[in-house]
Image (cartoon, rainbow, N blue to C red):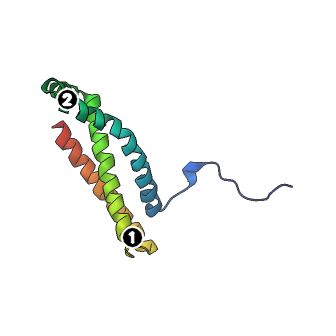
């Protein structure tokens, strides 16, 4: 029996609303934070072990890759907090309509981009 239904395998043609993108991004940043904890816990453990350990972490943090990982960690944490606050407001009964939900998602993503740039400037300069 052949089913006559449309099949769309080209994912680039699918357009998500801003609220869907914000929700998916919130989940992705949650997973990314889990993996970023490996770097954060290592840095805390080594830096608090001794003065030499602190100097080791300090010297490692001077490299481009370490700064990029730190910036990524800060950026992921920032979006996850902003997205979480957005979801909390929605849980209280606000921004649940389609228009206000999309607007709050766009504002959240725009604020995240601004804060990511600020974090990058702060970290590299």
Picture quarter containing residue 88? bottom left
Residue at 35% from the left image edge and 70% from the top image edge:
89
Residue 104: quadrant of the picture: bottom left
Q: Which residue is mark 1?
A: 90
x%, y% of residue 65? 29, 29
Residue neighbourhood size for the residue with mark 1, other residues' Cα within 10 Å, grouped as few (<14), some (14–19), many (≥20): some
**What residue is disc 2 on?**
49
Image quarter where the C terminus lies is: top left
Element under disc 1: helix
Q: Identify the element where label 2 is drawn.
A: helix
Q: Position of residue 63 (x, y in %)?
A: 23, 27
Q: Is residue 45 above or below residue 113?
A: above
Residue lying furthest front? 49
Task: Name which quarter of the figure residue 42 lies in.
Answer: top left
Q: Residue furthest left?
A: 51
Distance from label 2 to label 1 (Cα)? 43 Å
Residue 67 image offset from top left, x and y in percent: 25, 34
Q: Earlier in the sequence, mark 2 or mark 1?
A: 2
Q: Is the residue marked by circle 2 packed among few (<14), some (14-19), or many (20+) residues within 10 Å?
A: few
Side of 87 where 47 appears, left or right: left
């Amino acid at each position: 029996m052949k089913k006559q239904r449309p099949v769309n395998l080209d994912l680039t043609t699918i357009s998500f609303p801003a609220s869907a993108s914000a929700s998916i991004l919130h989940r992705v940043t949650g997973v990314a934070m889990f993996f970023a904890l490996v770097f954060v816990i290592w840095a805390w453990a080594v830096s608090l072990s001794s003065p030499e350990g602190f100097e080791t972490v300090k010297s490692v943090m001077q490299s481009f890759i370490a700064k990029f990982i730190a910036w990524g960690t800060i950026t992921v944490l920032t979006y996850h907090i902003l997205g979480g606050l957005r979801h909390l407001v929605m849980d209280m009964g606000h921004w649940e309509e389609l228009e206000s939900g999309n607007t709050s998602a766009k504002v959240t993503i725009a604020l995240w981009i601004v804060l990511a740039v600020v974090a990058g400037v702060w970290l590299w300069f």
